Amino acid sequence: METKIIDGRQIAAAVLDDVCVDLDKLSKVGVQPGLAVVLVGHDPASQAYVGSKERTCKKLGMHSRKEELAADTTQEELLALIEELNQDPRIHGILVQSPPPPHIDEAAVVRAIDPAKDVDGFHPVNVAKLALEDPSAFVPCTPLGCQKLLSASGIDTEGAHVVIVGRSLIVGKSLGLLLMAKAPQANATVTIAHSRTKDLAVVTRQADILVAAIGRPNFITADHVREGAVVIDVGINRVDDSSAKRGYRLVGDVDYEAVAPKCQAITPVPGGVGPMTIAMLMANTVKACQQMQG
Ligand code: NAP
């Protein structure tokens, strides 16, 4: 069987083309969507994520505001900035880069964001809207990107058994809600597995579509995968590699070399789910802006 390699860069570029069409329409009525990205502290990986979000915004012609705050910023100072952004008419989307320093109560910060500007989809209002299948919900960007990868690759989720390993809100749980919805590109039978799941490989081998969102390099082996399954690898893990310029390379949660030959289709790391996350963030920001226009 020839394995289809799902090209996340190409699909993300197509999503951004659609975003540009919407931006054109908004600009004709004098509206420019704006995204504010807030970073507390100087974690290099977070700085890189925030930088690429800002660059993508600017490239598309969206308004972008980057707030880099010192690591010792207090909870009150951060909440005051969120309130200012909630009130700023040029800003339609607000994102606080995770994880903040340990003295910050992240859940309280998320709850302080106006749900109408919560383009990350972590506010309880948006989590509830996702569960209630309300189309105005902001769905977290990575799960939204996974769904888009499947639909753009012609992989039908209707009636399919999707097994997701990982139950975080940012990925596994939200993707489960999204794919079990009574809606197009969904209607799947969803199983969510986690660290307490017994006989994991027995569960994952039942998957028509297997999603790995674990955070452990090469955790999913050929033994976990049924012949002919589709595999979506959400994992992004740094592993030491002295031959790489940076001293490390990125690998997924799936042992790609061993698993790919068994699959109908698979996402690579990098170049699979990763590029989709930023593309869906841009799409969510445009959606926020459109919803605010009424
Ligand atoms: P997380 O919050 O740490 O969640 C990991 C999940 O994996 C948990 O539900 C955990 O189970 C489960 N797990 C851990 N060990 C397991 C085991 N031995 N067997 C079965 N399940 C196990 O991580 P996350 O934020 O969801 O991220 C997961 C991965 O996706 C990471 O590599 C992250 O970097 C990547 N990621 C990528 C993107 C992207 O843009 N591509 C975005 C977000 C995250 P318990 O709940 O029982 O602990």
Image (cartoon, rainbow, N blue to C red):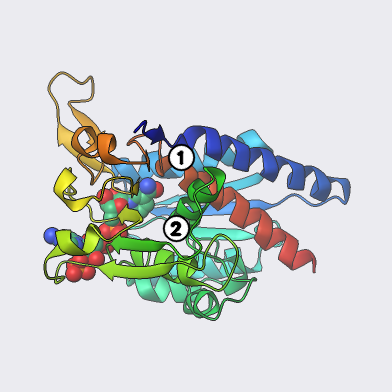
Residue density around tag 2, few if under 14, some if 14–19, many if 20 or more, within 10 Å: many
Residue 81: assigned label: none
- The response on whether ligand 1 sits within 8 Å of label 2 is no
Residue at disc 1, secondary structure: helix
Which numbered disc, 2 or 1, marks the residue that appears first in the sequence?
A: 2
Residue density around tag 1, few if under 14, some if 14–19, many if 20 or more, within 10 Å: some
Q: Amino acid at mark 2?
A: Pro
Residue 60 seen from this side: yes
Instruction: Give x and y (percent) for residue 282.
Output: 59, 49
- Who is closer to the viewer here, 47 or 236? 236
- In this rendering, the answer to whether 108 lies above or below 246 is below
Instruction: Give x and y (percent) for residue 235.
Output: 28, 48
Residue 275: assigned label: 1
Task: Name the side, left or right, on which 293 lies relative to 187.
Answer: right
Task: Name the side, left or right, on which 20 lies relative to 43.
Answer: right
The residue labelled by disc 2 is 143
Task: Name the side, left or right, on which 205 lies relative to 161.
Answer: left
Q: CA distance from mark 2 to mark 1?
A: 12 Å
Residue at disc 2, secondary structure: helix
Instruction: Give x and y (percent) for residue 40.
Output: 37, 55
Residue lying farthest to the right in this orientation: 29
Instruction: Give x and y (percent) for residue 1.
Output: 34, 33
Image quadrant assignment for residue 284: bottom right
For the point 20% across and 21% down, the residue is 244
